[in-house]
Amino acid sequence: MVDANQVLDIIVSGNLNRVIAAIVVLLIAFLVARFLGNLAAKVLGELKTNKILKESFGIRAPIEQIFGKGVYYLVLFIGVIVALNQLGLSTILLYIVLIIILIIIISFVILALKDFVPNVFASFWIHQKKIIETGDFIEFKDVSGKVIEINLTETRIETRDKEVVLVPNSLLLREKIKKRKGK
């Protein structure tokens, strides 16, 4: 059974105050993170970011939602750090956690961009040197057909069977291509 003096000692020592402060910080961080994440997604939605990226660059990713979630998790992460600081954890521990999380995020970004970046550069090269253009008939490897679209990351080719084949732009630069000008 807990003695009243023990409860009083906990309150006086300040540990309970620190725990309550940390919980309050987490609750506020959660609310602010939700608000700012939704706000960021709505602002980008009003700016028609997804539509602009799709039409201009052929990117079909839900950037508005991804950015909103990123803001949400960033604010939540900052709240967790502040809450841990309220509990009196050393700043060195917080820095170690921050560095580990940054390394993980950077690793994910590098892995996500390893295919994207070469395809984007290949797209610019294809457009600049006019290696192939929309309407051309091309043949390479096992694919032959009419180029119907060249976007930022891939080229769409319609085969004689009316199937659409998506080919990464970087592959078009690495392979030997037979080309006939379209009409």
Image (spheres, rainbow, N blue to C red):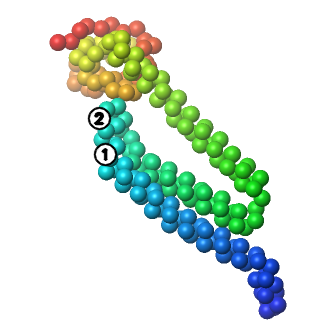
Quadrant of image for the N terminus: bottom right
Q: Which residue is mark 2?
A: 55
Measured Cα–Cα span from mark 1 to mark 2: 11 Å
Residue type, numbered disc 2: Glu
Q: Badge 1 is on which residue?
A: 48
Residue depicted at 59% across the width and 43% down the height? 105
* Image quadrant in which the C terminus is located: top left
Q: Identify which residue is drawn at 31% across, 39% down.
A: 52
> Of discs 1 and 2, which sits in the foreground?
1
Q: Quadrant of residue 164?
A: top left
Which residue is nearer to you in this view: 54 or 148?
54
Place of residue 73 in the rendered image (x, y in percent of width and height, measured from the top left): 54, 54
Q: Say what secondary structure mark 2 lies in.
A: helix
Q: Position of residue 126 (x, y in %)?
A: 37, 16
- Left or right: residue 80 versus residue 177 is right
Outermost residue to the bottom? 4
Q: Is 164 or 89 nearer to us in this picture?
A: 89
Q: Residue 140: image x %, image y %? A: 36, 12
Mark 1 surroundings within 10 Å by alpha-carbon count, few (fewer than 14), some (14 through 19), many (20 or more): few
Q: Residue furthest left?
A: 183
Disc 1, disc 2: CB below 8 Å? no
25 displayed left or right of 12: left
The residue under the point 25% across, 13% down is: 136
> Could you tell which of marks 1 and 2 lies nearer the N-terminus?
1
- The answer to whether residue 109 is left or right of residue 51 is right
